Amino acid sequence: MTTAWDQRATEADWTEVVELARSTPSPLLLAHVSPDGDALGSALAVGLALRELGNAPMVSFGDDPFVVPRILQFLPGQELLVAPADVPQETSVVFTFDASSAGRLGLHQERAENTEALVVVDHHASYTGFGTHHLVEPDSPATAVMALKLIDRLGVRLDQAMATCIYTGLITDTGSFRYAATTPHVHEVAARLMATGIKHDAIARQLYDTAPLGFVRVLGAALDRAVLETDAVGGLGMVWTTVPVSDRVTAGIGIDSVESVIDAVRVAQEAEVAVVLKEHEDGTYRVSMRSRGHIDVAQVNIALGGGGHRYAAGYTATCDLDTAMANIRAALAVAPHLQG
Ligand SMILES: [Mn+2]
């Protein structure tokens, strides 16, 4: 199995990256494909900070069509967004946010790998080591916390727009302060962000409590077809379900709109591991996996070709559903059980 990234960013790393960020007139700041609140929030926050310094940063992610997920369209700084096809060829400095592997850069992967400087800002234990500069701390609760550190080191005053972006990343990755990564420091960061006057209640409503009725119906169908396998995961149990493309077409919603189905499925107390397979239009599956704490699903998903965090991870399955489930059962059957 791949060993986890364990090199902390040194003072020299930070100094070098700050110098690079300050001296590049138009750096490209990338979130990973199908960006979540942590990826896009981090990229936009740093983009807004660099604009304060008089630079002209571009923010992008490697999806085609280039559409910001519905729940993130409220984020400030969207005027910094540039579609992959519109990024100038001569871009020499690229930052990536929350991408654990170069493959997560999608259409931007080739450009990023061939650039002079590729600065990786991330917190995944499954980080592969790609890039020329690494600001990667697996014990950081969110990439957004790393982004805030970078903003501070750039000497930019944190304003409400940046704080809204950082706060979005922070609550996305801590499950609104419920997950194990929620340390006293997380609450100190949150307090600092709130002190800028952000509308934290409106942010939470946008992220979690607003969706079209079509989503509610797709969620209902996915929950209805959930299967419990008590023998899976060495007897700890697995609950799994699917979101077929036909359901989404009927409801008129994209695959990014069903990311939160896993949050409802993983409630089932009979299962240690929850799995949701969301079908893409091309027949492949985006697989999300969650653990209750006894299984390291990052390792399981690295074995399956993906990555993630200890209790929340995923991968893309390019086979049919039955084969995908057989692979998942096999990977979970041999997953080491964590202590405690
Ligand atoms: Mn993250």
Image (cartoon, rainbow, N blue to C red):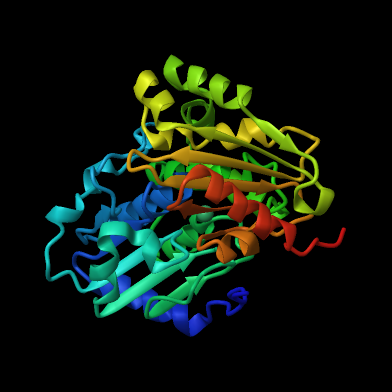
186 relative to 275, above or below: below
- Residue 239 image-quadrant placement: top right
Give the x, y percent position of residue 93.
25, 72
- Any part of residue 160 in sight: yes
Instruction: Locate residue 189, reporting x and y percent.
Output: 59, 51
Residue at 51%, 19% in the rendered image: 216
Q: Is residue 144 above or below residue 269?
A: below
Q: Is residue 130 above or below residue 303?
A: below
In which quadrant of the rendered image does the N terminus lie? bottom right
Q: Which one is in front, 254 or 49?
A: 254
Would residue 285 appear left or right of 249 to someone viewing this image?
A: right
Which quarter of the rendering shows the C terminus? bottom right
- Residue extending farthest to the top is 213
Residue at left offset 40%, top offset 78%: 133
* 195 left or right of 57 in image: right
Q: List the single residue furthest toward the bottom.
A: 12
Camera-side residue of 128 and 147: 128
Tell me if residue 312 can be seen: no
The residue drawn where x is 74% and y is 32% is 268
- Quarter of the image where one finds residue 109: bottom left
- Residue 238's spot in the image, x, y percent? 72, 43
Number of dots carrying numbers: 0
The quadrant holding residue 220 is: top right
- Residue 184, given in percent of the width and then of the height, sits at 72, 53
Q: Is residue 121 above or below residue 249?
A: below
